[in-house]
Image: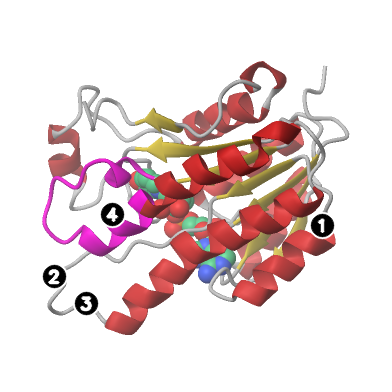
Amino acid sequence: MAGFSDKNILVLGGSRGIGAAIVRRFAGDGGKVAFTYAGSEDAARALAAETGSEALKVDSADRDAVIAAVAARGPLDVLVVNAGVAMIGDPLTLDPDAVDRMIDINVRSPYHAAVEAARTMRDGGRIIVIGSVNGDRVPFAGGAAYGLTKSAVQGLVRGLARDFGDRGITVNAIQPGPVDSDMNPADGPMAGLMHSFMAIKRHAHADEIAEYAAYIAGPHAAMITGSLQTIDGGFGA
Ligand code: NDP
């Protein structure tokens, strides 16, 4: 039984890490999946060949390109906005241009992509933005700029859920805690500190986030909207 057969699914930022796991999860369940990438051409091509999905080179920092890609791919059944970057460090020395680019990718792009998707989305569609537990809690120095982008996602999904609810479209954030990926390796220098905040002291696997995304995108989650779905091993508890 293919749970997402005939569903038109777009994953923004799908070439690596959590996004790639989400592409595999939906494609493996019969979905017609396209995903975007910016820099990881080889990984994107390999994933497209492996899963039968379509790879589209679209920089999430480019608002007009993101809107055009979402419009061209519509009408969608599911939009997942996963593309994100993390600038962690002393705010007195972080490059302000890099911080602004992070805000473009992590905040402006999800907003414009979600609005554009909803323009043509079929009733009962699903919009999922990958936020972070750092939207709730920033328990270390250097996380202000990243944290502000993930807190912004919270307002975004709450508001858009109300805008599109009458069409049965749900809009939710999934808020992972530490997940093993290039962004945050399970054996990285911050791992011990992160685990110290957690009830279950390990990084999550990207597959665990993808499975949660599949549930939120599926038929049993029709009444879950405007919500923050935290999957963090108790990081924020
Ligand atoms: P990775 O760095 O491993 O992968 C990031 C993905 O996003 C890649 O596919 C990358 O594509 C894509 N991406 C980044 N910038 C752009 C861009 N400008 N345009 C298009 N695509 C882009 O990160 P993760 O998988 O760990 O993170 C995915 C999401 O999950 C992010 O939003 C992150 O903030 C969030 N998250 C991650 C956590 C973690 O511990 N890993 C915890 C909580 C949230 P490419 O390489 O082709 O540019």
Mark 3: give few (<14), some (14-19) or many (20+) Cα within 10 Å.
some
- Measured in 3D between alpha carbons, the distance from the residue under mark 3 to the one under mark 4, in whole angstroms, is 14 Å
Q: Would you name the residue on which mark 3 appears?
A: 94
Q: Secondary structure at mark 3?
A: loop
Q: Secondary structure at mark 2?
A: loop
User: Residue 149, image x and y in percent?
Assistant: 36, 58
Residue 161: numbered disc = none
CB contact under 8 Å: marks 1 and 3: no
Q: Would you name the residue on which mark 2 appears?
A: 90
- Measured in 3D between alpha carbons, the distance from the residue under mark 1 to the one under mark 4, in whole angstroms, is 30 Å
Residue 73: numbered disc = 1
What residue sits 59% from the left and 76% below the top?
A: 62
What residue sits 13% from the left and 43% below the top?
A: 193
**Left or right placement of residue 87 versus residue 10 in this view:** left
Q: Give the camera-side residue of 112 and 230.
A: 112
Q: What span is in magenta?
A: 132-151
